[in-house]
């Protein structure tokens, strides 16, 4: 949710912190701040608004010092304001803290600290950490940090500086990602690899309850018991450019254009060397388990959940395994029934979504086996799951997920095909043919991208709608859900997604002359029924845009606008069918002048409940 970073070295820290925050701004952008240690003690600059505001604020007045921490905020406790922006300090201003996560027992601690004489200046939960560090400081900062960690409940990654320990920088992790890197003369931490890439390709992932002490060029990590531990270095393959806009106006547009590559990379990474079969080194369900499989439960949030809805239908259609999808944030609160060995699939781009982590832990606690599908190597979900299948979409920076979504569908498709083969429902030859079709999808996506002007023109005509309805049947219903979410989150247009057949059970009352309806109609077998639904809304005055497979007749004459997508196996059509909808959402938001990569109120990685 928030992004935190810190550095200690020979160079001036403020510019390094600002560059790191720039790379993490997608994690939260309602305020930002930095704190530097220098001969005057701790100097803080912070401001409400995006990083540019802070940048302007410190122009010509950059705080000096080679030790510092920085923060970019997504507000949870206390409105976005200068005063609530991090870093926060104790009353003497000798300890400064940046925080990602939520301190759940902060109110209790705050009341107690007030009774001990502390004066609070912010509404944040974080401020208690700064006061506690001062309260418990007995001269040994490490011991103080352990003491504070023992009283904090919730999830937190903290970065800490203290003018009493000017040669060290500290950070701790509990249920909130934290990554370290070092060079010969400096050490760094950050919530996200992208903030560290300019310093090193080799990073160290902290584990839960780890405490790290960073000095110039050296890092000592201790586990939750205070024992010095070694954390394996992880090599990061993607380049700094991969996390930059590369000439596109927005990350989202760049990432949409990267979809053919993302799918190709994801598919190839799960195929045998000759590309003719699904690699068995990768697939986590063995033949015996596949035959015995009674049920699959997919747990995820938001877009990942909609990818899961497609996965559910593929597991049922191809592998004939009953499957369900659960919203991760609901799962643990509904007393789920889990039998030992039940199979769970957690889908998460970031691998850090708190609700998905909690659902995964609950599934494991109840005896389930958990397979993760994630885009981030070394993320919490990747590390805690029983097995991982990676999507190789590359870094996804725009808050609106695009290339990660279709890569998730690709992995779910491969899993479904693999299970179908192991359950003897399709032959090796049929599986091979399906793989050949999958290999053609990146090219089909490219041909949709090549016609983006048509979509842009339509967006230009329709961007001022107040409300849009998305509809579809079967896989197209899942697609409609994602298309609707994409439009809402970046253009702020109200939209609803409906199973087309469900419309007449209530929602059709909302259709009136001029209502915009988008009908997803990529499933030929359901086309006739979908056409009936188009007629139902048309006679009530709706304007209809339909997305159909090339060569499908009988739709163009019924609707105002039709977009054709290349034909593929209908089960794989969602990966192509979503592309025009992502572009439509993008161009509508562009017309409206919205902040596309960083939509209001949202953050890329939702690490709070
Ligand atoms: C996608 O456009 C959204 N920003 C959001 O729904 C996202 O998919 C969801 O928060 C889950 O994130 P994850 O895949 O990183 O777990």
Image (tube, rainbow, N blue to C red):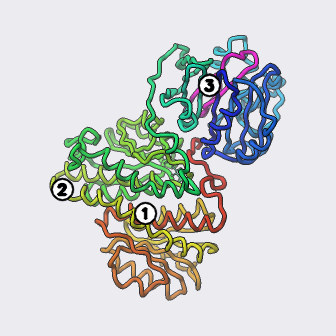
Instruction: Identify the residue at horizontal 72%, vertical 44% (top origin).
Output: 31
Which numbered disc flags the more N-terminal residue, 3 or 2? Answer: 3
Above-or-below relation of 208 to 354: above
Q: Which residue is tagged 1?
A: 478
Q: In this picture, which residue range is highlighted in magenta?
A: 149-176
Where residue 375 appears, x then y in whole percent?
44, 44
Q: Is residue 474 magenta?
A: no
| Residue at horizontal 71 percent and vertical 15 percent from the top | 165
Residue of label 3: 171
Mark 1 touching mark 2, by CB under 8 A?
no
Estimate the x, y position of residue 23 in percent, counting from the top left.
60, 41
Q: Which residue is nearer to you in this view: 76 or 179?
A: 179
- Is residue 337 in view from this perspective? no
Circle 2 residues within 10 Å: few <14, some 14–19, many ≥20: some
Labels 3 & 2 near each other (Cβ < 8 A): no
Quarter of the figure with the C terminus? top right
Which residue position is annotated with label 2? 425
- Which one is in front, 33 or 242? 242
- The secondary element bearing badge 1 is classed as helix
Residue 42 lies left or right of residue 18; in this view the side is right
The N terminus is located in which quarter?
top right
| Horizontal arrangement in the rendering, residue 426 relative to residue 444 (left or right) | left
Is residue 504 something one can see in this rendering? yes
User: Label 3 vs label 2: CA separation?
Assistant: 52 Å
Q: Is residue 24 left or right of residue 284?
A: right
Residue furthest front as drawn:
247
Disc 1/disc 3 C-alpha distance (Å): 41 Å
Viewer-side label of 1, 3: 3
* Mark 1 vs 3, N-terminal side: 3
Percent of width and height locating residue 562: 44, 78
């Amino acid at each position: 949710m928030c992004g935190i970073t810190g550095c200690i070295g020979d160079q001036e820290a403020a510019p390094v912190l600002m560059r790191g925050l720039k790379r993490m701004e997608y994690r939260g952008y309602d305020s930002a701040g930095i704190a530097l240690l220098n001969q005057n003690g701790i100097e803080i600059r912070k401001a409400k608004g995006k990083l540019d505001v802070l940048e302007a604020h410190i122009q010509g007045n950059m705080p000096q010092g080679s030790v510092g921490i920085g923060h970019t905020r997504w507000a949870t406790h206390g409105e976005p304001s200068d005063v609530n922006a991090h870093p926060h300090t104790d009353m003497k201003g000798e300890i400064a803290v940046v925080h990602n996560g939520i301190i759940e027992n902060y109110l209790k601690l705050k009341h107690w600290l007030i009774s001990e004489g502390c004066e609070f200046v912010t509404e944040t939960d974080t401020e208690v950490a700064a006061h506690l560090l001062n309260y418990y400081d007995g001269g040994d900062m490490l011991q103080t940090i352990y003491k504070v960690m023992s009283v904090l409940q919730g999830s937190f990654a903290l970065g800490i500086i203290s003018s009493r320990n000017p040669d060290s920088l500290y950070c701790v992790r509990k249920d909130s990602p934290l990554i370290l890197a070092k060079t010969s003369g400096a050490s760094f931490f950050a919530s996200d690899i992208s903030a560290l890439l300019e310093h090193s390709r080799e990073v160290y992932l902290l584990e839960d309850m780890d405490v790290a002490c960073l000095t110039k060029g050296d890092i000592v990590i201790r586990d939750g018991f205070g024992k010095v531990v070694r954390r394996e270095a992880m090599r990061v393959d993607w380049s700094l450019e991969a996390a930059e806009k590369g000439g596109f106006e927005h990350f989202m547009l760049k990432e949409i254009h990267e979809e053919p590559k993302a799918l190709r990379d994801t598919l190839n990474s799960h195929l045998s060397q000759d590309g003719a079969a699904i690699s068995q080194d990768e697939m986590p369900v063995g033949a015996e388990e596949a035959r015995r499989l009674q049920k699959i439960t997919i747990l995820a949030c938001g877009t990942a959940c909609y990818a899961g809805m497609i996965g559910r239908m593929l597991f049922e259609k191809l592998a004939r395994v009953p499957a369900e999808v659960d919203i991760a944030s609901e799962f643990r609160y509904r007393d789920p029934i889990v039998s030992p060995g039940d199979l769970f699939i957690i889908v998460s781009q970031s691998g850090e979504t708190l609700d998905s982590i909690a659902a995964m832990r609950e599934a494991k606690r109840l005896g389930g086996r958990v397979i993760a599908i994630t885009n981030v190597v070394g993320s919490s979900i990747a590390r805690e799951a029983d097995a991982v299948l990676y999507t190789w979409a590359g870094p996804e920076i725009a808050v609106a997920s695009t290339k990660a979504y279709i890569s998730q569908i690709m992995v779910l498709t491969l899993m479904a095909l693999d299970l179908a083969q192991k359950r003897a429902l399709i032959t090796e030859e049929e599986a091979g043919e399906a793989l050949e079709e999958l290999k053609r999808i990146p090219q089909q996506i490219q041909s949709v991208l090549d016609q983006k002007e048509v979509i842009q023109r339509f967006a230009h005509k329709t961007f001022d709608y107040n409300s849009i309805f998305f509809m579809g049947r079967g896989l197209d219903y899942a697609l409609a859900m994602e298309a609707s979410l994409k439009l809402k989150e970046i253009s702020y247009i109200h939209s609803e997604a409906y199973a087309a057949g469900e419309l007449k059970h209530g929602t059709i009352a909302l259709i009136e002359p001029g209502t915009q309806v988008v009908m997803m109609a990529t499933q030929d077998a359901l086309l006739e029924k979908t056409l009936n639904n188009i007629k139902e809304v048309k006679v009530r005055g709706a304007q209809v845009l339909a997305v159909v497979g090339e060569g499908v007749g009988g739709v163009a004459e019924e609707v105002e606008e039709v977009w054709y997508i290349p034909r593929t196996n209908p089960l794989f059509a969602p990966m192509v069918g979503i592309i025009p909808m992502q572009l439509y959402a993008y161009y509508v938001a562009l017309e409206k002048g919205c902040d596309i990569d960083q939509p209001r109120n949202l953050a890329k990685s939702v690490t709070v409940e």
